[in-house]
């Protein structure tokens, strides 16, 4: 698996939200954005995001590693994803 830079991960998450999940709040996307409160992502949308990350980027995200604190903000999500690569 290719190691992705933080910028590549950032752009991948942005692309998934805008083009694959069709999230209307994609224009508020930035590292400090909260997934639930600012981007209005519910738990189902977060699971869809995880699935796209696995399929599109070839990441392996074990279920036992999924903890809410990693999915609070875009920044915490990127920190989590960087730890996987």
Image (spheres, helix red, strand yellow):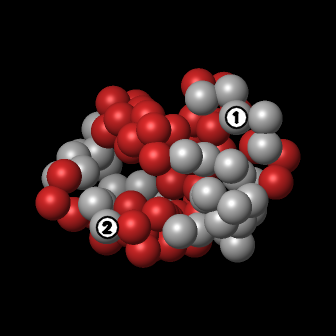
Residue 6 can be seen in this image: yes
Assess disc 1: are there few (<14), some (14-19) or many (≥20) residues with their C-alpha within 10 Å of its C-alpha. some
Q: Residue at x 42, y 74 (%)?
A: 69
Estimate the x, y position of residue 55 in percent, counting from the top left: 33, 30
Q: Is residue 85 above or below residue 52?
A: below
Assess disc 2: are there few (<14), some (14-19) or many (≥20) residues with their C-alpha within 10 Å of its C-alpha. few
Q: Residue at x 40, y 41 (%)?
A: 47
Q: Residue at x 74, y 59 (%)?
A: 38
Q: How many marks?
A: 2
Residue where numbered disc 2 is placed: 67
The answer for how far apart the CA atoms under marks 1 and 2 are is 22 Å
Residue where numbered disc 1 is placed: 23
Q: Quadrant of residue 54?
A: top left
Q: Secondary structure at mark 1?
A: loop
Estimate the x, y position of residue 10 in percent, counting from the top left: 59, 55
Viewer-nearest residue: 33 or 1: 33
């Amino acid at each position: 698996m290719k190691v992705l830079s933080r910028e590549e991960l950032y752009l991948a998450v942005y692309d998934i939200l805008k083009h694959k999940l069709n999230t209307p709040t994609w224009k508020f996307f930035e590292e400090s954005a909260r997934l639930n409160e600012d981007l209005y992502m519910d738990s189902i949308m977060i699971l869809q995001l995880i699935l796209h990350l696995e399929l599109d980027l070839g990441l392996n995200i074990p279920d036992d590693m999924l903890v809410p604190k990693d999915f609070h903000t875009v920044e915490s999500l990127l920190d989590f994803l960087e730890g996987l690569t």
